[in-house]
Amino acid sequence: MKFIELKNVNKTYKNGITAVADMSVEVSKGEFVFVIGLTASGKSTFIKMLYREEKPTKGTVFVGGLNHVYQYGTQHTSRRIDRCIIRYFGYLSTDENTQPNP
């Protein structure tokens, strides 16, 4: 079963910078995934689209079978998506991981 699915997703910011271009990804339930890449390659934007901090300019994003793009903002669906995100996602930015300990 697909737990995460992005279909032909693009994210272009108002300043004209394209962070994600024509991305398609499938992650099955139970898979463990690392997102790695060069600086400014769209990693954070990709993750932010999964937990709805960013909305794609084009394409569809499904998490737990729910379509973020078309069901974005309905109260019932937002709560269901939020529960999926809280339960299944862990997020650690490189800044948090590379700062020296006091």
Image: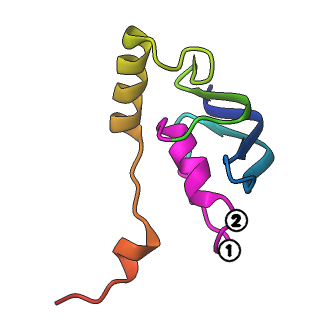
Is residue 15 or residue 67 the one in the foreground?
Answer: 15
Q: Which of 43 and 30 is in front in this view?
A: 43
Which residues, given as a range, are shown in magenta?
32-53
**Residue occupied by mark 1:** 38
Q: Which amino acid does label 1 sit on?
A: Leu
Residue 38 part of the magenta segment: yes
Q: SS for tag 2?
A: loop
**92 shown above or below 96:** above
Q: Position of residue 37 (x, y in %)?
A: 67, 69
* Above or below: residue 31 compared with residue 39: above
Q: Quadrant of residue 69?
A: top right
Give the camera-side residue of 25 and 32.
25
* Within-10-Å neighbours for mark 2: few <14, some 14–19, many 20+: few
Question: Which residue is the extreme one toward the left?
Answer: 102
Magenta stretch: includes residue 65: no
Q: Say the numbered circle drawn on residue 41.
A: 2
Secondary structure of the residue carrying numbered label 1: loop
Residue visible at 61% across and 49% down?
46
Q: How far across and down, in percent of the image, does residue 34 sit? A: 56, 60
